[in-house]
Amino acid sequence: MFTMPTEVYYGPGIIGSSEGILKKNGLLEKRFLLVRGNKSFEALKDNGLLERAPWLSNSAGEYIVNGEPTLDHLSQALKLARELEVEMVVSVGGGSPLDLGKAVAGLYFADPNDSVEDFFYKKKRLPNKKLPFIAIPTTSGTGSEVTTVSVLIDPGRYKGSIGYRLWFPDIAFTDPQLTHTLNERYTLSSGLDALTHALEAVASTGSDPLTMRLAWGAAETIFEILPELMRDLKNPTYRERMSWASLTAGLSFATSGLGLCHAIGHAIGLLYGVPHGLSVSAMLPAVWNFNAQYIDEKLRRYLDITAYDVLKRLEKFYQALGYDPKTYNLTGSGPVKVKSSDLQEIVRITFQGKSYKTNPRPSNEEDIIKLVEETFQIV
């Protein structure tokens, strides 16, 4: 069943209408915590964001998150929100601010004596109410503005998700103009994240004809547009189409679930410091090939394509981007070289989460190790 209670306002310049929309929904006067990135938000301010959405200047306080959010970030932001006695949380940025803000809103009414670790590791039930949450994405990749989950890191132990059906954002403003300041690396990483969401949503055991067609439309757009965008980062038409693809991919996987690309990619990201979009997309060719015979029939039936057609298109797409996970600078200081001594830890983290459960082909320890060996250099 396709469920999506978030009010989504999409389009170039839609952020300029946000004040009136919040007023209509009775949210404009609420005390709010602003969760944001640092450099990206400053770039947007320089680009006139606060002139178009002056209400963003009226926060009761700000929490700035750099890098992917950790449990410490969540504890600190949650403490700040409670000290400020906020009535709403607003996130502006990529997946990190959106995921963190969503978790703050979702855990605000939890017992302050309970640790965030208790909720992250499923030792405590999540509260049955939350603060209103407004999501304003500034990348085209995470889809967090239309999903129920927050991806968080417990450094050295686990990277995974927390959330449930009540955690859908109340309102999302998806304005492609807010992505115009993204540099080349963030454009690539977020775009590949969106593609991984789309293709895993197509393949997932939780997919249906509606989510499959929605997700495949997103994937086709990314296949076509991302290589062009990488050559022309300021092109507003390409930015708009990528924003739409990211949004629809998010709508799809919020219902269908994901698969082994995210399950293994979380482990690689945690252990080797690889940005989320690059770590999950690195796994796509090997995982898609692994799943191919299990998804070919439904792809033929609902999308009139074969799994192997998609694999060939994916390989051609990566070639156009110059993106080879074995040699690409995934970490920022070079390619990933997976230590053979880390393979068991990768397996542990892969099966600790839930993304593997909706992968179309069942997997075991040997399968995970083989997929990692196919994707990365092993040392």
Image (cartoon, rainbow, N blue to C red):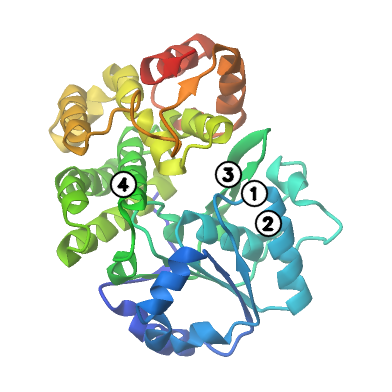
- Do residues under tags 3 and 4 come within 8 Å of each other at their CB atoms? no
Give the labeled residue for mark 1: 70
**Marks 2, 4: nearer the viewer:** 4
Badge 3: residue crowd in 10 Å (few <14, some 14–19, many ≥20): many
The local secondary structure at tag 4 comes to: helix
The CA distance from mark 3 to mark 4 is 23 Å
Mark 3 lies on residue? 161
Give the camera-side residue of 287 and 177: 177
Residue 270 in the image, given as x and y percentages of width and height: 57, 35
Asked whether the residues under the numbered discs 1 and 4 touch, taking CB atoms below 8 Å apart as contact, a structural biologist would say no
In this figure, which residue is indicated by the disc labeled 2? 74
Name the residue located 56 percent from the left edge and 16 percent from the top edge.
343
Q: Assess whether mark 2 and mark 1 are in contact (beta carbons under 8 angstroms).
A: yes
Q: Residues within 10 Å of mark 4 (few under 14, many from 20)?
A: many
Residue kind at label 4, given as amino acid type: Leu
Q: Which of marks 3 and 1 is in front?
A: 1
